Image (cartoon, rainbow, N blue to C red):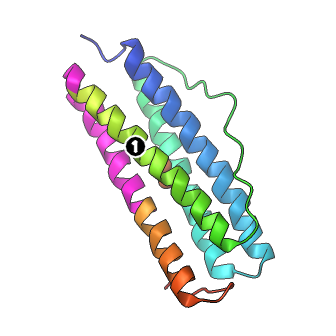
Amino acid sequence: MTVREPGVAGYLGRAMSLELAMVQQYLSHARLASQWGMDRAATWLRGEAQGEMEHADRISGRLLALGMVPGASVLRPVAPVRDFGSLLQANRDREREIVAFYEGAVTYCQRLGDADGGAFFNELLAEERQHLAEVEAWFTAYTEGGTSRSQRRR
Ligand SMILES: [Fe+2]
Ligand SMILES: [Fe+2]
């Protein structure tokens, strides 16, 4: 059994596409937040984009270490949003999908007996759960704030 088995390559390739799609989504949404005068939210979203970029960097390293080259091509388009509430919902949906994806990747590696791969995906999973918690905290602050321009997050 080897980590170069097509399933693992598939998970890594898909992970790269998901991470890069989040980079473009967070960058785009950060610009929108700036346009709406929400500087604190814009800074947070830009930081998220950097976090996703760092994930893509780690996946690149993992692929190269396994003798593969990253091959993400068509990225999922940025979710169109009309206000800060729908922006948060769009990112909550995507972070949930990524959490579910990495859960699947960890389970897959465990079934394969690939401890290294499982640990690799598990770290990403923990960080994506953190992203999801952050988006949810923003969403709670936004909805409880009751104002369309709430920036009550610390
Ligand atoms: Fe990520
Ligand atoms: Fe994320």
Q: Secondary structure at mark 1?
A: helix
x and y percent of residue 15 in the render?
Answer: 49, 35
x and y percent of residue 21 in the render?
Answer: 63, 43
Task: Name the residue nearer the viewer: 139 or 106.
Answer: 139
Categorize mark 1 by other alpha carbons within 10 Å: few (<14), some (14-19), many (20+): some
x and y percent of residue 140 in the render?
Answer: 48, 78
Q: Amino acid at mark 1?
A: Ala
Residue bounds of the magenta highlight: 111-131
Is 120 part of what is drawn in magenta? Answer: yes
- Left/right placement of residue 150 relative to residue 1 reads right
Q: Is residue 70 above or below residue 138?
A: above
Q: Residue at x 60, y 89 (%)?
A: 146
Q: Residue at x 19, y 22 (%)?
A: 113
Q: Quadrant of the N terminus?
A: top left
Task: Name the residue nearer the viewer: 150 or 43.
Answer: 150
- Left/right placement of residue 7 relative to residue 70 reads left
